[in-house]
Amino acid sequence: MSETIIYSAQKIITMNPSRPNATHVAVQGGRILAVGDLTELETWGPYRLDESFADKILMPGLVEGHAHTMEGTLWRNVYCGFFDRADPDGKTWDGVKTIQAIQDRLIEAEAKLTDPDAPLSGWSLDPIYMDNKRVTRADLDKVSSTRPIGILHASGHILNVNTKALELGGLLKPGINHEGIPLGTDGLPTGELFGPDTMTPVGVHVGFNRSMTDSDEQGLRDFAKLCVRTGVTTITDLAARLEPDGVESMLKVTNEETYPARVVPLQIFMGATAKETVDKVIGLKARATDRLRLGRIKAVADGSIQGFSARVRWPGYHNGAPNGLWYTAPEQLAELYRLALAADVQVHTHTNGDEATEMVLDTLGPALKDVPSPDHRFTLQHCQLADAAQFRRMDKLGMCVNLFANHHFYWGDEHYRLTVGPERATRMNACRTALDTGVPLAIHSDAPVTPLGPLFTAWSAVNRLTASGRTQGEHEKIEVSEALRAITIGAAYTLHMDDEIGSIEVGKKADFAVLEDDPTEIGGANLKDVRVWGTVQGGRIFAAADL
Amino acid sequence: MSTPIPVTVIGGYLGSGKTTMVNHLLRNANGLRLAVLVNEFGELPIDEGLIEAQDDDIISIAGGCVCCSFGSDLTGALMDMAVLHPRPDHLLIESSGVAIPSAIVGSLSLLDGFRTDGIVILADAETIQASANHKYMSDTVLRQIADANIVVLNKTDLVNEERLGATFEWLANQNPDVRIVKAYYGKVMPDVVLDSFLGKASGVGPSHHTADIDVMTLDIEGRVDVENLARALADSENGLIRAKGFVTSLCGQKMLIQVVGSRWETSNASDSMKDGIVCLGFKGEVLQGLKMLVNSMTVETVPQG
Ligand SMILES: [Zn+2]
């Protein structure tokens, strides 16, 4: 039998309602043996007391229910975002606020490249914060006119390139007539490329290749470092292609002795039939390990709101843009839901617009009549525009929701002004309504779209501030305690893992977020400033400072 | 640079018979090397006997045809196609049931080495109008029809004459420029779908022919105003489904004319090509009238020198 270690802490926030707070936790073989005070724990026999967390706050390891491992890979490119952001090595990159600053940063990175033909790639650009001033190929030509340069936007759906890159991609030509490629006064592309179909031909020349959503081994390791720095011990990779090679490398890397996170990859439903997809996932489920939880599916119903590709109900987009696109037909979703319910495979479905949410509700209802499944926990991901009536239906159907609280901060102003208008922007990501209706709630970052950091996400849901500093949706705010639930046991519930993780109680994994500050005392307005020391994952200690 | 690969986009809502038609075309490829890009393999019942080899993303079919699945990465799959050896004679893209075909054509236009040979939309004679009224899919289905150069009104055996007539009328109202070809089991003359067949004896048995379609060749002697002729051939008044051939322009340049429904284009061609246009159209309608039209647009060849 392995050794029992008792950790003392300044405070343990357990998320277990029968014992909300404690001072000690006993760990044995990577699991929690007992939680309480030292006298209670001593009854379990011999132990070693470890006081290294005596001045720390322990919370259950945080659970990020919607992220992408690709964030790990993207950090190998030059960070061009507007907001300060920490990389896997712990260095915080200042946000770049002007095109000049972007150029300076790229020039600095360019100087370090030895191969004159190697591409220079950046990421996380967002002109919205720079008065929507667009970056042009001329701007990037000032960095280099001989080396291909590309910067991916924060959304992941726009790419800015220089002239050399356009030339290599075959797009430096007059006569292009494509809504995803704006042209300059000279009749040539400005260098901004919208949507995957326009990005791909050029993207391959600037370091963003076609399989960039598949994280490689280094990317997976870097991704896990970010988890430790943000207190995360279980994280999803929400939409993986899970090609055979990818699965092997994920199994290999997550199995490494020092790999600090539990990764939950969801097989994307695209380019294969419902039956093939479910069969494949049943096969994958059998290969799942503790740190690689294969066996779930993600479907995509529509696009994004700021890209005007989300499906919205009447009265449509506020600026009059035509309705968005369906990515999956209702008949295909219906088949997927039936087969998955019958096989006990969980499906998470991306919906952004309220029409897409409605379609999923209309589709899951009949599937559940055919295949009654009392505890399916099918989850709506993003689900940003859902109204109260839709939350009531989610409740009746037994669905969970994972709302995009960070989005409200980063793009809330844009939605208010442009995409859906004041009323609907105010109700977006309606956490209060979800909880009041009884819909199990998680909240997410969608990293790399916004930075990984559940405590920031919790802050977003508690304060509902937008980037410009406005409170948007006073009545959809939630309490700190509710937000902390959403990033622990709440997210665990949406993954059907609340019996193993998400709270500090006997029998569960010894997964802790180790904090310097007490999130229940620091005040809702400061929640994002809680300092993370590191994590304990499966009983293994990971200090952020030692990564 | 070699001539671009012609690409036909085949669209239509779920269940309209796209896959069945693609299979029909593969069975009747008759020596043409067809490459087919499909969203997914799952529903593709390629005759076992035709499959020569199969791996994850590509199926090789007897006679030099290939079939590839593209999932979410159509552009990437097209880039692979552009360097495929041997080079396909014609590419078919079977788009997903919710795809907007004009968006695919837009993406195609960005890539060198391809030429759009039109958008063919399949419509299920029994359900198309219901799909166009579907709570969620209405605008998608209507956009697909609006994008079409040719609609294959499929499964005509499932509805009576009267209903078929009404559906035909309805389609024509949705898109006045479209040419509507009736079919069942996706059995449509390959010439209707693929420009590459046109003017070649396609060798498809008569049972596959839609009885009301005719092919004729217009001989042209003299020079023509090429753009005006192409535009006239594409005019729905003339009832052509497709036309393709060579003419000599007013200034003596040999030109290729390609017409799919109301879509037309002209391009320079080699002087060695013989003048003449192969036309595919509806029997008895106006094919004969075309002869007069062409004559009226032709000027006598001025002797050189
Ligand atoms: Zn996502």
Image: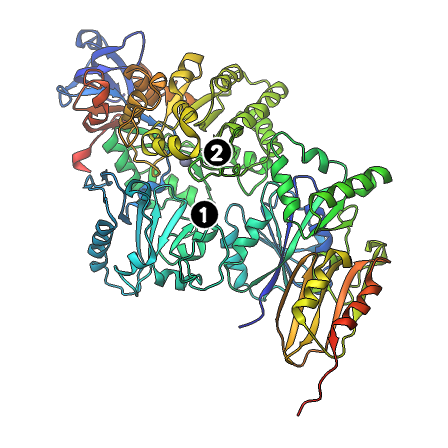
Q: Determine whether, in the image, residue A252 is placed left or right of residue A530.
A: right
* The one of B66 and A164 positioned closer to us in this rendering: A164
Up the image or down, A406 lies above or below A502; here it is: below
User: Which amino acid lies under the numbered mark 2 shown in the image of this protein?
Assistant: Tyr
Q: CA distance from mark 1 to mark 2?
A: 19 Å
Earlier-in-chain disc, 1 versus 2: 1
**Is the shortest distance between ligand 1 and the CB of mark 1 under 8 Å?**
no
Q: Residue at x 76, y 67 (%)?
A: B278
Whether callout 1 and callout 2 share a subunit is answered: yes
**In the rendered image, which residue does mark 2 sit on?**
A317
**Tag 1: amino acid:** Gly
Residue at 82% across / 37% down in the picture?
Answer: B163
Which residue is under mark 1? A195
Residue A495 makes an appearance in the image: no
Residue found 49% across the figure and 62% down from its top: A175
Q: Please name the colour scheme applied to the rendered image.
A: rainbow
> Horizontally, is A177 left or right of A70 in the view?
right
Task: Name, please, the residue furthest toward the bottom.
Answer: B305
Seen in the image, is A295 located left or right of residue A471?
Answer: right
Residue A329 sits in which quadrant?
A: top right
Is B2 situated above or below B189? below
| Chain letter behind tag 2 | A
Residue A74 pos. (x, y %): 32, 45
The location of residue B107, given as percent across then percent down, is 52, 54
For the question of whether residue B258 can be seen, the reply is yes
Q: Judging from the image, what secondary structure is the residue with disc 2 in?
A: loop
- Report the side of A330 relative to B45 (left or right): left
